[in-house]
Amino acid sequence: MTKKNAGNWLVVINPNAGLRAGEKDWPTINRLLVEAGFSFDAVFTERPFHAIELVRELIVSKGYRQIIAVGGDGTLNEVVNGIFQQERFCSDEITLGMITVGTGNDWGRMYGFPLKYDKAIRILANGLTFLQDVGKVKYRYDSEDKNRYFINIAGMGFDALVAKKTNLMKAKGKGGTLAYLYNLVTGLFQYKHTQMNIVIDGHEVFDGKIFSISIGICKYNGGGMMQLPFAIPDDGLFDVTVIKKASKFLVIRNIKNLYDGSFVKLKQVKTFTGQKISITSTPRHATFLETDGESLGYSPLDFEIVPKAIRLIVRKKALKTFGTPKAG
């Protein structure tokens, strides 16, 4: 065993990720991890939000400080929330790696993470870590205030509707990028523009009808759509993209421009940065929320950036334009 892989790792597998690729491919991933010299304990999630419970409880009871998530963006999101819900260690004292088997893999796309398992595990074995910012959002669900952390992008308005429709398809064993595109188009005929007020760092930046809002740390969501093309994951700031009320024709005509970020040049699009963001809507609970592709709750919404709060294993090649990697 190499020194970088020494110590016990916790591997959290979502068997349903990637249309059950998590379950089907686990024997291969297990073998590759063993061959790479990892010593680990493996646990499987059994239901939504189960990874949060597993990670929180096992860090406290077993003292794990090295974790690998095997799944998609939603699995990674749950593992991150489990890390933040425990109080045994500071969040940046825990090293988190990813083996992507999901359908979107947008966090991995930010860092050029490979989909081939042997290449991903080679990156994990190298142990190069990077401290990334984390977002925290307070929202409403069943008349109660709730909190959620996220490491990629939160979406509201039309984006949240598409995520909800896609998640319902995933629950039925369907999904993938094509499913997201299908729901994007069909959702256009269901979505009603919402009146929203947006305040960033104490300054009102928008008050009017909204088509969609993206707030995040990384660039991609929806299986490769570059919603936040200027995002830097360790600058201590959220990037914000606001798409004002737009016609169905305009949206359909510019779908391809979502994939290279050029849609932000449209006059209907505004971009901002900030550390604290508040969003209210009329009616009060009319704005729905998703974070890292997971459907959550509704407005009012309060976002807060947590700078350099999570230690992630990444590729050195992906860090040429931001941050300073450290040997794990």
Image (cartoon, grey):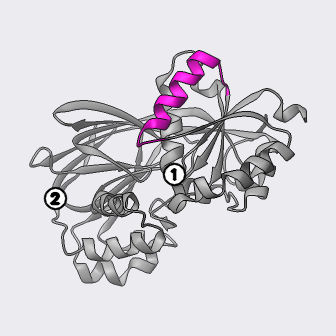
Cα gap from disc 1 to disc 2, whole angstroms = 27 Å
Image position, residue 195 (x, y; %): 14, 56
Q: Which residue is mark 2?
A: 194
Is 1 above or below relative to 35?
A: above
Q: Where on the picture, by quarter, is residue 238? A: top left
Q: Residue furthest left?
A: 283
Q: Are marks 1 and 2 in contact (CB under 8 Å)?
A: no
Image position, residue 178 (x, y; %): 45, 75
Image position, residue 191 (x, y; %): 19, 67
Which disc, if any, is residue 73?
1
Q: Quadrant of the N terminus?
A: top right
Does the segment drawn in magenta span residue 285? Answer: no
Please name which of the two marks, 1 or 2, marks the residue nearer to the observer: 1
Is 227 above or below relative to 248?
A: above
Mark 2 is on which residue type? Thr
Mark 2 closeness class: few <14, some 14–19, many ≥20 residues within 10 Å:
many
Left of 1 or right of it: where is 207?
A: left
The region drawn magenta spans 46-65
Of callouts 1 and 2, the N-terminal one: 1
Image position, residue 241 (x, y; %): 38, 58
**Residue at coordinates 49% horizontally, 43% vertically from top-left?**
77
The answer to whether residue 151 shows anywhere in this view is no
The secondary structure making up most of the magenta span is: helix
Mark 1 is on which residue type? Asp
Q: Where on the picture, by quarter, is residue 174? A: bottom left
